[in-house]
Amino acid sequence: MRRVESAGIVVAVIDGPCAGADLERALDADIRVAADSATFSADGVADVAACGRRLARLLGEARAKEIVLGRRTFDAATALRLGIVTRVVPQTAVAETTRALVDTLAALPPLALPAIREAVRAARELAPDAALALEHTHFRRLLATRDHKAAVEAFFERRPAVFTGE
Protein backbone atom coordinates (compact mmCIF):
# COMPACT_ATOMS: atom_id res chain seq x y z
CA MET A 1 0.00 0.00 0.00
CA ARG A 2 1.32 3.42 -0.88
CA ARG A 3 -0.16 6.87 -0.58
CA VAL A 4 -0.04 9.55 -3.27
CA GLU A 5 -0.99 13.15 -2.58
CA SER A 6 -2.29 15.56 -5.17
CA ALA A 7 -3.47 19.06 -4.32
CA GLY A 8 -4.00 18.05 -0.69
CA ILE A 9 -6.09 14.99 -1.55
CA VAL A 10 -4.60 11.66 -0.45
CA VAL A 11 -5.01 8.61 -2.68
CA ALA A 12 -4.24 5.17 -1.25
CA VAL A 13 -3.02 2.68 -3.84
CA ILE A 14 -3.45 -0.91 -2.71
CA ASP A 15 -1.81 -3.44 -4.99
CA GLY A 16 -1.12 -6.29 -2.60
CA PRO A 17 -1.97 -7.36 0.96
CA CYS A 18 -3.35 -4.53 3.08
CA ALA A 19 -3.51 -5.33 6.79
CA GLY A 20 -2.90 -3.74 10.16
CA ALA A 21 -1.14 -0.38 9.92
CA ASP A 22 -1.40 -0.40 6.12
CA LEU A 23 -5.17 -0.78 6.39
CA GLU A 24 -5.29 2.07 8.89
CA ARG A 25 -3.30 4.32 6.56
CA ALA A 26 -5.50 3.33 3.61
CA LEU A 27 -8.68 4.08 5.55
CA ASP A 28 -7.38 7.55 6.36
CA ALA A 29 -6.96 8.40 2.65
CA ASP A 30 -9.57 10.39 0.74
CA ILE A 31 -9.73 7.98 -2.20
CA ARG A 32 -8.73 4.32 -2.22
CA VAL A 33 -7.82 2.48 -5.45
CA ALA A 34 -7.21 -1.27 -5.27
CA ALA A 35 -5.84 -3.80 -7.69
CA ASP A 36 -8.23 -6.67 -8.31
CA SER A 37 -5.63 -8.95 -6.71
CA ALA A 38 -5.40 -6.96 -3.43
CA THR A 39 -6.46 -8.48 -0.13
CA PHE A 40 -7.60 -6.77 3.05
CA SER A 41 -7.41 -7.91 6.64
CA ALA A 42 -7.88 -6.61 10.14
CA ASP A 43 -5.90 -9.17 12.11
CA GLY A 44 -7.95 -8.96 15.29
CA VAL A 45 -7.38 -7.44 18.70
CA ALA A 46 -4.19 -5.58 17.73
CA ASP A 47 -6.08 -3.75 14.99
CA VAL A 48 -9.05 -2.66 17.10
CA ALA A 49 -7.34 0.55 18.15
CA ALA A 50 -5.79 1.10 14.74
CA CYS A 51 -8.71 0.34 12.44
CA GLY A 52 -11.83 -0.05 14.53
CA ARG A 53 -12.78 3.62 14.72
CA ARG A 54 -12.21 4.27 11.03
CA LEU A 55 -14.00 1.10 9.97
CA ALA A 56 -16.92 1.90 12.28
CA ARG A 57 -17.30 5.35 10.73
CA LEU A 58 -17.05 3.95 7.24
CA LEU A 59 -19.08 0.74 7.58
CA GLY A 60 -21.05 0.99 10.81
CA GLU A 61 -20.33 -0.57 14.16
CA ALA A 62 -21.60 -4.10 13.52
CA ARG A 63 -19.71 -4.59 10.26
CA ALA A 64 -16.52 -3.09 11.73
CA LYS A 65 -16.70 -5.49 14.68
CA GLU A 66 -17.28 -8.44 12.37
CA ILE A 67 -14.21 -7.55 10.30
CA VAL A 68 -11.88 -6.75 13.21
CA LEU A 69 -12.99 -9.35 15.73
CA GLY A 70 -13.69 -12.00 13.12
CA ARG A 71 -10.18 -11.66 11.71
CA ARG A 72 -11.69 -11.59 8.23
CA THR A 73 -9.53 -11.44 5.15
CA PHE A 74 -11.36 -10.40 2.00
CA ASP A 75 -10.68 -9.57 -1.62
CA ALA A 76 -10.83 -6.28 -3.49
CA ALA A 77 -14.33 -6.94 -4.86
CA THR A 78 -15.62 -7.35 -1.30
CA ALA A 79 -13.75 -4.23 -0.20
CA LEU A 80 -15.49 -2.31 -3.02
CA ARG A 81 -18.91 -3.70 -2.10
CA LEU A 82 -18.35 -2.74 1.56
CA GLY A 83 -17.17 0.76 0.63
CA ILE A 84 -13.62 0.30 1.90
CA VAL A 85 -12.18 1.12 -1.53
CA THR A 86 -13.61 3.50 -4.08
CA ARG A 87 -12.27 1.73 -7.18
CA VAL A 88 -11.00 -1.69 -8.20
CA VAL A 89 -8.92 -2.01 -11.36
CA PRO A 90 -6.90 -4.81 -12.95
CA GLN A 91 -3.44 -5.22 -11.42
CA THR A 92 -1.90 -4.17 -14.74
CA ALA A 93 -3.85 -0.88 -14.73
CA VAL A 94 -3.12 0.33 -11.18
CA ALA A 95 -0.29 2.70 -12.13
CA GLU A 96 -2.12 4.13 -15.14
CA THR A 97 -5.38 4.57 -13.21
CA THR A 98 -3.60 6.26 -10.31
CA ARG A 99 -1.71 8.60 -12.65
CA ALA A 100 -4.94 9.61 -14.42
CA LEU A 101 -6.67 10.21 -11.08
CA VAL A 102 -3.78 12.31 -9.76
CA ASP A 103 -3.71 14.31 -13.02
CA THR A 104 -7.47 14.94 -12.72
CA LEU A 105 -7.09 16.12 -9.13
CA ALA A 106 -4.14 18.37 -10.05
CA ALA A 107 -6.28 20.12 -12.70
CA LEU A 108 -9.00 21.04 -10.19
CA PRO A 109 -9.06 24.37 -8.36
CA PRO A 110 -6.51 23.98 -5.55
CA LEU A 111 -8.38 26.23 -3.13
CA ALA A 112 -11.59 24.23 -3.51
CA LEU A 113 -10.12 20.80 -2.84
CA PRO A 114 -9.38 21.24 0.88
CA ALA A 115 -12.79 22.89 1.30
CA ILE A 116 -14.50 19.94 -0.38
CA ARG A 117 -12.50 17.51 1.75
CA GLU A 118 -13.45 19.32 4.96
CA ALA A 119 -17.11 19.70 3.99
CA VAL A 120 -17.48 16.01 3.14
CA ARG A 121 -15.87 14.95 6.42
CA ALA A 122 -18.01 17.46 8.31
CA ALA A 123 -21.16 16.01 6.75
CA ARG A 124 -20.31 12.75 8.46
CA GLU A 125 -19.14 14.16 11.78
CA LEU A 126 -21.23 17.28 12.46
CA ALA A 127 -24.89 17.92 12.97
CA PRO A 128 -26.61 18.73 9.66
CA ASP A 129 -27.00 22.45 10.46
CA ALA A 130 -23.32 22.81 11.40
CA ALA A 131 -22.19 20.91 8.30
CA LEU A 132 -24.37 23.10 6.08
CA ALA A 133 -23.02 26.25 7.74
CA LEU A 134 -19.46 25.10 7.07
CA GLU A 135 -20.34 24.38 3.42
CA HIS A 136 -21.86 27.85 3.10
CA THR A 137 -18.75 29.46 4.61
CA HIS A 138 -16.49 27.69 2.12
CA PHE A 139 -18.82 28.54 -0.77
CA ARG A 140 -18.84 32.26 0.08
CA ARG A 141 -15.05 32.32 0.49
CA LEU A 142 -14.44 30.50 -2.80
CA LEU A 143 -16.78 32.80 -4.74
CA ALA A 144 -14.38 35.65 -4.02
CA THR A 145 -11.33 33.95 -5.51
CA ARG A 146 -9.62 34.53 -8.83
CA ASP A 147 -9.99 30.81 -9.52
CA HIS A 148 -13.78 31.16 -9.40
CA LYS A 149 -13.62 34.03 -11.86
CA ALA A 150 -11.34 31.94 -14.11
CA ALA A 151 -13.81 29.03 -13.95
CA VAL A 152 -16.76 31.24 -14.93
CA GLU A 153 -14.84 32.81 -17.81
CA ALA A 154 -13.68 29.40 -19.04
CA PHE A 155 -17.23 28.08 -18.86
CA PHE A 156 -18.61 30.86 -21.05
CA GLU A 157 -15.66 30.64 -23.43
CA ARG A 158 -16.12 26.85 -23.61
CA ARG A 159 -12.54 26.03 -22.70
CA PRO A 160 -10.81 24.36 -19.75
CA ALA A 161 -10.12 26.63 -16.80
CA VAL A 162 -6.58 27.25 -15.61
CA PHE A 163 -6.37 27.61 -11.84
CA THR A 164 -3.67 29.49 -9.96
CA GLY A 165 -4.73 28.97 -6.37
CA GLU A 166 -5.65 32.61 -5.91
Image (tube, grey):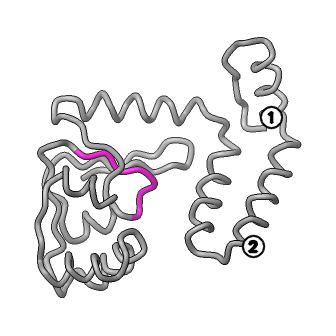
- When the figure is inspected, residue 36 is found, relative to residue 148, above or below; the finding is below
Q: Which residues are magenta?
A: 28-34
Q: Element type at marker 1?
A: helix
For image coordinates 13% across by 81% down, the residue present is: 70
Say left or right for 119 vs 66. right
Question: Which residue: 38% across, 73% down?
Answer: 54
Which amino acid type is marked by label 2?
Asp
* Residue at point 16%, 36% (across, down): 91
* Magenta-span inclusion, residue 59: no
Q: Cα distance, mark 2 to mark 1?
A: 25 Å
Instruction: Decide which of 14, 4 is in the foreground and name it.
Output: 14
- Residue that numbered label 1 is attached to: 148
Residue type at mark 1 is: His
Residue linked to disc 2: 129
Give residue 42's position: percent from left, percent from top.
18, 73
In this rendering, position of residue 162 left or right of residue 86: right
Asked if disc 2 and disc 1 are in contact, CB closer than 8 Å, the reply is no
Measuring from the top left, give residue 2's x and y in whole percent. 29, 50
Q: Residue 20 appears at what percent x and percent y?
A: 21, 71
Q: Nearer the viewer, residue 33 or 133?
A: 133
Q: Which quadrant of the figure has residue 133?
A: bottom right
Q: Earlier in the sequence, mark 2 or mark 1?
A: 2
